[in-house]
Image: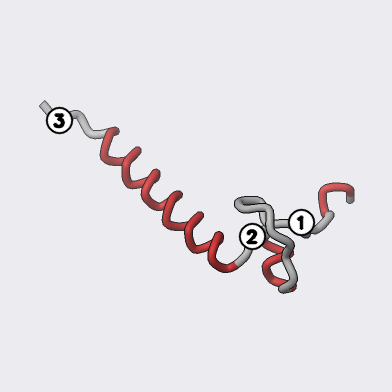
């Protein structure tokens, strides 16, 4: 159960988390949105690079 500890600071920016859902996720709302945009971009980029364009 050691891995079930809640993150009380944002994993992205280091600010203190106060919202229960933010603590559960480990990021504040703004950082979570930015993280989702970054990971979506990386997935699209990776998928695009997987095609053989010649």
- Tell me the CA gap for discs 2 and 1: 8 Å
Q: Residues within 10 Å of mark 2 (few under 14, many from 20)?
A: many
Q: Residues within 10 Å of mark 3 (few under 14, many from 20)?
A: few
Tell me which numbered mark, 3 or 1, is placed earlier along the sequence.
Answer: 1
Do the numbered discs 2 and 1 sit on residues whose CB atoms are within 8 Å? yes
Q: Residue at 67% of width from left, 61% of height from top?
A: 25
Depth check: give the residue in front, 28 or 2: 28
Q: Which residue is mark 3?
A: 53
Q: Position of residue 31 (x, y in %)?
A: 55, 60
- Tell me the CA gap for discs 3 and 1: 43 Å
- Tell me the CA gap for discs 3 and 2: 38 Å
Q: Which residue is mark 2?
A: 27
Q: Residue at 61% of width from left, 51% of height from top?
A: 12
Secondary structure under badge 1?
A: loop
Tell me which numbered mark, 2 or 1, is placed earlier along the sequence.
Answer: 1
Do the numbered discs 3 and 1 sit on residues whose CB atoms are within 8 Å? no
Q: Which residue is mark 1?
A: 7
Colouring used for the render: secondary structure
Secondary structure under badge 2?
A: loop
Compared across the picture, whether 20 is left or right of 30 comes to right
Compared across the picture, whether 45 is left or right of 18 comes to left
Vertical arrangement, residue 21 with respect to residue 13, above or below: below
Compared across the picture, whether 49 is left or right of 43 comes to left
Depth check: give the residue in front, 25 or 47: 25
Compared across the picture, whether 28 is left or right of 19 comes to left
Specify the farthest residue to the left: 54
Quarter occupied by the C terminus: top left
Q: Position of residue 32 (x, y in %)?
A: 55, 61
């Amino acid at each position: 159960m050691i891995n079930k500890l809640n993150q009380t600071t944002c994993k992205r920016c280091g600010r203190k988390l106060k919202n229960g859902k933010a603590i559960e996720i480990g990021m504040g709302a703004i950082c979570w949105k930015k993280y989702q945009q970054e990971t979506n971009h990386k997935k699209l980029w990776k998928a695009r690079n997987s095609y053989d364009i010649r």
